[in-house]
Image (cartoon, rainbow, N blue to C red):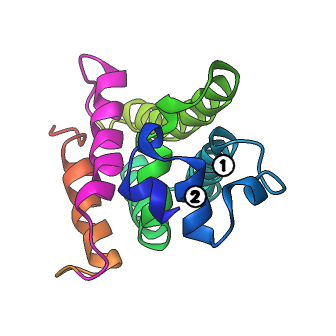
Amino acid sequence: MALFSEHTFPVIGMRDIGDAVGLLPGSLYAHISSKEELLADIVTEGITNYLVELRPFLESHDPAPERMRGAVKAHVRVLAKTLEQTRVAFHQWRFLGDGVREQVIQLREQYEDVFLQIYRAGVAEGTFRKARSERIAVLAVIGMLTSASEWYSPEGRLGADEFGEALAEAAVDGLVATG
């Protein structure tokens, strides 16, 4: 995973993967059929990790701002545990072939839908303002979260919980209805 996190998919060869795991390139084919298969597994598992942690916020009956804060903080908890995989999952999925890419797009849409449903619930209950474009409002939150993998550091000044709280504050404050 570190290899894909440090370099982009097109520049990584089977020899690089073999060197990273201590196998000859020919021996890799006993374990994977292609580097694309490996990338697909990393991306699919990476996005699925987020869906598992975010789905409870769809089922919650808490007010939408609390659910959105919880979802943002859950995203950061997953990020802190899977930083390299997250970088690959959210930034290199475009290198996948059409069939696999379509499956990943469906997973990404499920991820987006978590935030969209929470946002819509907030608009319905009057706790979130109605944005000119609900999709752009949601994608702004998601963009903040997915780009965090580029600048979050487990060794940084803020731990994962404080970092998540700060992101949640920034995300939700931008959506809250101001009477």
User: Percent from the top left, x then y, of residue 77?
Assistant: 45, 70
Residue mark closest to the camera, 2 vs 1: 2
Front-most of 18 and 66?
Answer: 18
Q: Which mark is residue 80?
A: none
Residue 105, given in percent of the width and then of the height, sits at 58, 28
Q: Report the magenta residues as a range.
A: 129-155
Q: Residue at x 53, y 61 (%)?
A: 1
The location of residue 71, given as percent across then percent down, is 45, 56
Q: Amino acid at mark 1?
A: Leu
Quadrant location of residue 166? Answer: bottom left
Residue density around tag 1, few if under 14, some if 14–19, many if 20 or more, within 10 Å: some
Q: Are marks 2 and 1 in contact (CB under 8 Å)?
A: yes
How many C-alpha atoms fall within 10 Å of the one at disc 2: few (<14), some, or many (≥20)? some
Q: Which quadrant holds the C terminus?
A: top left
Residue furthest right in the image = 30
Place residue 109 in its image quadrant: top right
Q: Where is mark 1, residue-wise?
A: 38
Foreground pick, 38 / 76: 38
In the image, is residue 153 part of the stretch drawn in magenta? yes
**Residue 11's image quarter?**
top left
Which disc is residue 17 wearing?
Answer: 2
Inspect the image, locate mark 2, and give the three-letter code of the amino acid beneath it: Ile
Q: Position of residue 117 (x, y in %)?
A: 51, 34
Q: Secondary structure at mark 2?
A: helix
Asked if residue 45 is positioned above or below residue 9 in the image, the reply reads: below
For image coordinates 55% across by 68% down, the residue present is 20
Q: Is residue 142 left or right of residue 46?
A: left
Q: Is residue 4 visible?
A: yes
At 38% from the left and 51% from the top, the residue drawn is 7
Q: Look at the magenta stretch and give its main secondary structure.
A: helix
